[in-house]
Image: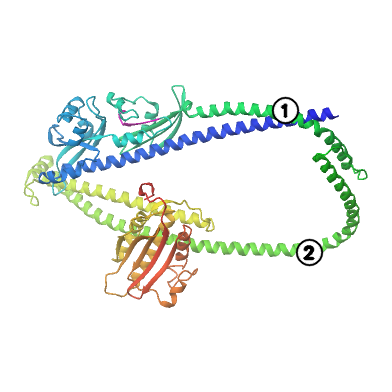
Amino acid sequence: MNWSIRLKFLIVMSGLLAVCLSVYLFMAITVFKTDKTQLVFDLNRSQVANLISQLETQFTGISEKLKLFTLMPADLQSKMVDDLFSEGSEIVSVGIFRSDSGQSVRAFNQQKFLDTYGLNPDFFSELIQDHPIPFANILRQGQDVWNASSAHGPPLIGYGRLVVLQDKTGRPVEQWAVVGFVKLDRILKLASTVRLGSIVVANRRGEVLVHPEAQALLQHPQIVDDTLFKEALATKAKLSLADREVQGRRVLAAFAHGFDDQIVVVAKASESEVFQVVRDFTVRTLLFGTIVLTLVILAAFLLSRSLTENIALLVERMESVSRGDLTSLIRLKGRDETITLANTFNQMIHDLRESRDQLETMNRELDQKVKERTVQLEEQNKKVKEVQEALIRTTRMASMGEIAGRTAHEVLNPLTILLTRLGLMQKRVQSARSQQLSLLDDIRKAWNKDFSEGGFDRLLTNWQSQSQIQPQNNLFQEDLSNLEHVASELRDQSANLDKDILFVKDEGERIAKIVNAMRRLGHLNSESKPTSLHGVLNDCTQIMADLFAEKGFAIVKDYRASQDVCIVDRDEMLQSITNLMRNSLQALEEADTAEKRCMTLTTRDEGGVLLIDIEDNGVGIPHENQKRLFESSFTTKASDRGTGIGLGISRRFVRGYGGDIEFVSSVPQSKTVFRIRLPLSAEHDIKGAVA
């Protein structure tokens, strides 16, 4: 009997440990592998997004500097060129060329760069001869980027753009190609931070612009046949992730394109590099588990000798107890914990025997009481159910009313702004369209009249006659100028419509978010991020600009804060600030003052807190109403102008970020000030904040 229990004990302990080790190993490998894969994807996404953002910012600045250099008058070049291309600038050489002949017009070379690398003064002239500038691409695309590295100097990137000069009427007079050479110190430093895999930057033609090994750029490598590069060009998304089989190997990659699709960034890491740590972890875990399993088996064998005998007696006696035998007690030999366990079992048997006797008596008494109470409880349950159903209906109706009130108020702000912008769009489009249609109709009638009277010859003769409006041109040139003017106006209208459509889309999405938030019964589920409050204020003024301009009111911005990054949800802050601005607008409408009416946004930072003051010189707030401003549903406005819950909702949002909205002061017909307090983020770097 003892050997049977001992053997079972050893088998159970060993099997249990083996199962636990196997499950742990499987889960650890699976989780570690999944986390490692996600880590690589997140790392590649972060690196690619950061690098493409840096490149877009850098080349946008370079493009503007080249344009400024091109348009700079000759008498100001000597004064401003050193500031424009200082020693710390990435641009080391600039040249202006005629687009039709490629003849150099003006050039600037950074002397410090030449001295640093020991290059002769003719280095850039020789560089252009060895690697000709792609004027055709610049003329066709408006700009181009290429690998301009030379074996006689450090790695460089060439960038060229087209600059068109116009006269006072907006007609193109002359176009130049301005070319700059950019050093790679800053970009190579970003690319060299990659730890898993590699990262490559190329242009649309597959020419490698940035490589982890800088010297490789001197060979002008190409990745035009690379599978991931082709996929990056084909996808429309600016940033994408990929898990692909490339040449028989699994590759985890991320790629992005930017700067008008002129630059493509590809970051990738092979599975063998990523999961080597997982394989090492598996081998070590197996070795450690084998050692532990062996030690546990030995310890269990030794321990079982002293435990199995008493445990067998305990098992046998407890089986008797389970069958209802509560008369005999357990008697064991020894001094270990099993004696204490046996005594506890004996006490439990005694208690069970007494409890069984008491329960039998109580059961007989309770049986009668249960029958009596059952009848009473059935009647009470009916009444409770009726009360619960009534309470549920009342609660639902109250929730629906609160949601409807909040939704109506919060949707009113963006909806009013949206309708105002649509009205302005309609007026602008109707005014411009009538002028353009009238001009086109005049030209059509004149051509039709000439053609019907004398055919194409009469039309051609009249075209050659002198214009009375533009004496320096004939009638054909005048008509052509008018057509060009109409085309330019249509392009401008199209651009303005695109901006207005984007504005309307943003406001519509804001309305959708407000409705969805109210559907969650006011539950806060915001996405708080480091956000530039100056950027949020700029968006608010843009949103409210149409409403203020329609009434002839001014918006003044006075940003004094040196730090403005707070951890907030951008959309909720837009909603809170525009609520306050809308209140100011309504106060300005009701004001009766000769002074120019305006609203002022002032920011400053004090002791780790950002203060935003919203001030207007409107009608003001009576003293008796000032203490009730933040009460739910309190309002002095008509039902079609407010519900009285806007300030409460705005304050709730701001308090959710550790801040508050305060009423500062109000002087009737003179000044009213509200203040928003928000704790500044511990990290004040604006580069990491949402603008």
N-terminal of the two: label 1 or label 2? 1
Quadrant of res 462: top left
Q: Position of residue 483 (x, y in %)?
A: 18, 46
Q: Amino acid at mark 2?
A: Glu
Residue designated by label 2: 379
Q: Residues within 10 Å of mark 1 (few under 14, many from 20)?
A: few
The residue drawn where x is 9% and y is 50% is 470
Q: Is residue 141 left or right of residue 74?
A: right
Q: Position of residue 653 (x, y in %)?
A: 47, 59
Q: Amino acid at mark 1?
A: Leu
Q: Is residue 170 left or right of residue 389?
A: left
The label number, if any, that marks residue 298 in the structure image: 1
Above or below, 91 relative to 225:
below
Magenta part of the chain: 198-206
Above or below, 363 relative to 664:
above
Q: Is residue 221 visible?
A: yes
